[in-house]
Image: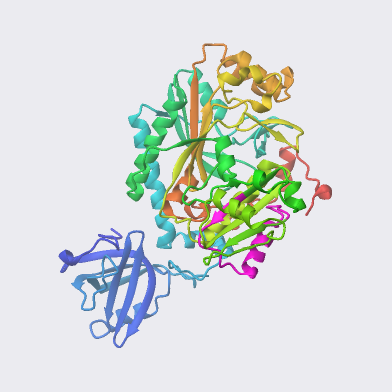
Amino acid sequence: MYRTNTCGELRLSDCGKEVTLAGWVQRTRKMGGMTFVDLRDRYGITQLVFDESDNAELCDAANRLGREFCVQVKGKVCERQSKNPKMPTGDIEILASELRVLSPSLTPPFTIEDNTDGGDDLRMRYRYLDLRRPVVRKNLELRHRMTILIRNFLDSKQFIEVETPFLIGSTPEGARDFVVPSRMNPGQFYALPQSPQTLKQLLMVAGFDRYFQIVKCFRDEDLRADRQPEFTQVDCEMSFVDQDDVINLFEDMCRMLFKEIRGVELPKLQQMTWKEAMRRFGSDKPDLRFGMEFVELQDLLKGTGSFSVFNEAEYIGAICVPGCANYSRKQLDALTEFVRKPQIGAKGLAYIKYNADGSVKSSVDKYYTAEQLQAVKERCQAKDGDLVLILCGQNANKTRVQLCSLRLEMGDRLGLRDKNVFKCLWIIDFPLFEWSDEEQRLMATHHPFTMPNPDDIPLLDEHPELVRAKAYDFVCNGIEVGGGSLRIHDTNLQEKMFEVLGFTPERAEAQFGFLMNAFKYGAPPHAGLAFGLDRFVSILAGLDSIRDCIAFPKNNSGRDVMLGAPSELEPKQLEELHLKVDMSQSDF
């Protein structure tokens, strides 16, 4: 055997045993005639001792060990004289009698420790070394534990796990598809699934009743901290259920995960409509860990003073920041520059400082009376010492989104977004459609198979923009963790959806004829939900990016710098696929 024990399991009760360990050299220390080696494996670290007076040749071999050498050691478990209470194995050490180098190592490009000196690009290039760091490995161990808990929970609720194909047809809605050329069908392409949406609906038609799959999905979209080109969903679908059935079951699953992983008892979660979330927080995924809810000031500031910017605005909104009336001009200028960033797009920022001594200082005080500024204070429920920040604009929803960015920035600055506090809720009653400036048409907010609210179906012909969806999102700490909807199971209603979305009957038949035909064979009412596993793990692990809980992630350019992907194909491969690469139109 290469080992009798792991490097994390030996204790004082094992003293006197002859053991064999195998692992990687974390570090070596020479102290007089003694050499100490910390040996690491997945399970922990154990200190090895090589005594020159006992075996000079063996000690000399230990002195030649470098970091990350893979070695095997035999020896006796002894009690340490100088114990280390920070290590589970800190009460013992191994007095080595044999040493075998299984594989030497080059000097690592960065230190394999929790507090490493390696930057993101370097660690991603040598991800197999980065994964040796305990802090990274723990994230994947947490991910493993969560998937086991999820599988066991869903199995207990009569769900069956079914695999669906990765090579499917391209869909016209949603993000861009990754496409795969077919050698056997020249000029034709598969697409990698953005989700198993239509396939799981077909499983409901097939009578499987309750399906789930922990599955890879693929979207060719711009990346950020909580996005990757390939990601993992906990994908689920149920027959003969309504919205409350789905929400209640998966709320129980989330409650179980928070309890098992973090020891947190989630209360019964509130449900907030999309319209209310946008009005109060400017976001369909509001962070409820702190206040600063929006306050509308149009009736107090528009047309009541001489400030033309407010007088011409359609929406004037504010947040009250507690205890920040002492903000300096420099700090306020920095906030103004923040909201003017292109990705936020506000033209400026107004403020009112209600000082602790009762005085008021404002960027708009020359346009409004003291009584008007006092009315704003009362509306915002501000106290002496508080700061009120105001944005305005011609488009209410756009200005609310800008105000949301400012609210989150202030939450970060004041340390109110504690990763050890969890505030979850359901967002419901989304709009069924949203306008796309790029496409110049209505698009499905979620996907074309989402059930309209039955009360709003008469509006589909004349006012589709007012139709609500029977859809729901699970939100935690300002992050959309999961979402789903009731599905259309009636062929006529599905055809109407395609018509509103601008599909010709021929195009709808070509793209989704298989699904619409399936609905003609006794399709049950059904609904589903999918959780982003990467996001869920990152929240429970307290991470800033989902990359840290994915074994081999892509960088922000969608590249795998370790594997060198994507890369060019050999001319022979292109020829077999009947493809020709034309770089003349490239932006690069």
Q: How many marks?
A: 0
Snapshot quadrant of residue 162: top left
**Residue 33 vertical position relative to residue 494 in the rendered view, above or below:** below
Which quadrant of the rendered structure holds the N terminus? bottom left
Q: Looking at the image, is 532 positioned above or below residue 163? A: below
Residue 297 image position (x, y, % from top left): 63, 46
Q: Quadrant of residue 364?
A: bottom right
Q: Is residue 321 magenta?
A: yes
- Residue 9 position, x and y percent, is 25, 60
Q: Which stretch is magenta?
A: 318-347
> Per the image, is 49 magenta?
no
Residue at (75, 41) in percent of width and height = 575
- x, y percentage for residue 359? 58, 65
Say above or below: 64 vs 156: below
At x 61%, y 56%, the residue is 389
Can residue 510 be seen in the rendering of this structure?
Answer: no
State left or right for residue 563 relative to residue 211. Answer: right
Rendered location of residue 440, percent (x, y): 77, 33
